[in-house]
Image (tube, rainbow, N blue to C red):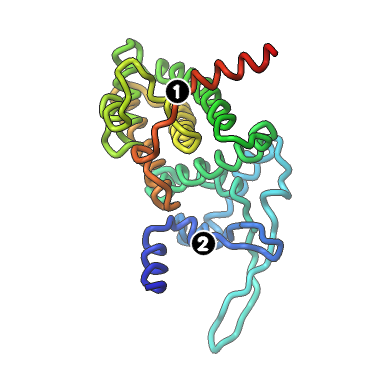
Amino acid sequence: MKNQNAITNAKTQSVFEQIRKIDEQGMEFWSARDMAKVLEYSEYRHFLPVIEKAKEACKNSKQRLSDHFEDILEMIEIGKGGIRQIDSVKLSRYACYLIVQNADPSKEIVANGQTYFAVQTRIAEIKQMQEYAQLNSEDEKRLFLRNELTHHNIKLADTARCAGVIEPIDYAIFQNHGYMGLYGGLDAKDIHIKKGLKKSQKILDHMGSTELAANLFRATQTEEKLRRENIKGKNYANQTHYEVGKKVRKTIKELDGTMPENLPTADSIKKLETKKTKRLKK
């Protein structure tokens, strides 16, 4: 049974997760050689310009290059049991994120990689944020993530408007496409029913921290994709939101997470906000 579970996990696990390695210090990393193969580059030398573009993006984001890109030597087998050393690069998760952003966007595997590493990088960012790291309770995490989502939904609305989503009804349809992608075809009305919410209750106000995080990933990555690819037209914007939501859902599945529609309904976050306000006044 154990072997069967291992086979099943290997089949459902993201290919990017399958090639992830752990070094002697217990830190995760990816081999540039492995990444080149997964991203379907016929020869490693064709992949080198992508690495250079990713390094440039890393420097532009004020990150220390050595924290994310480390030149290494890998051992490979050659004929008759021999081995030889080849050049490679030890990549952090953030480095992989930059690489898939600069790889050939026409490849489906690159698009999948963009979503996978964007989601995982965002998780890491939140975990690394001092404010978030200091939060111990579920209530504090919910308040933090709900505020983050409010902020990013404003950015998403502005970017969607530039793409052609102008009228309130258009934006409601646009939002529904994101929900349907993330929630396996359920739109806002369906989610209300599934969660046992009244029509007047806001879905986001009754999400736990895990569900809020999933929706935060959906919002941030849709906003970035609309802007990065300069998408124009309501239909294209709607489809983009749906596809991003769908890929975030796929990533949750690959990580053996609970689908958002099956997560428990939380008490209204308004109660938490009221408690926090009273506490601050005291």
Estimate how packed mark 2 is, as few (under 14), some (14 to 19) or many (20 or more) residues with alpha carbons within 10 Å.
few
The one nearer the camera, 129 or 38, is 129
- Residue situated furthest bottom in the rendering: 80
The one nearer the camera, 23 or 71, is 23
How far from the left and from the top, in percent, is residue 65?
A: 71, 46
| Label 2: element kind | loop
The one nearer the camera, 193 or 38, is 193
| Label 1: element kind | loop
Q: Residue at x 45, y 29 (%)?
A: 219
Quarter of the image for the C terminus: give it.
top right
How far from the left and from the top, in percent, is residue 144?
A: 58, 27
Q: Residue at x 46, y 16 (%)?
A: 158
Tell me the number on the disc at residue 19. 2
Mark positioned earlier in the residue sequence (2 or 1): 2
How far from the left and from the top, in percent, is residue 256?
A: 42, 53
The one nearer the camera, 236 or 245, is 245
In the image, 25: left or right of 240?
right
Instruction: Name the residue beneath numbered marker 1.
Output: 268
Determine whether 190 is above or below 96 in the image: above
Estimate how packed mark 1 is, as few (under 14), some (14 to 19) or many (20 or more) residues with alpha carbons within 10 Å.
some
Determine whether 206 is above or below 29 in the image: above
Identify the amino acid type marked 1. Ser
Alpha-carbon span between mark 2 and mark 1: 41 Å
Q: Residue at x 49, y 57 (%)?
A: 17
Determine whether 110 is above or below 261 in the image: below
Residue 221 shows in this picture: no
Which quadrant holds residue 20? Answer: bottom right
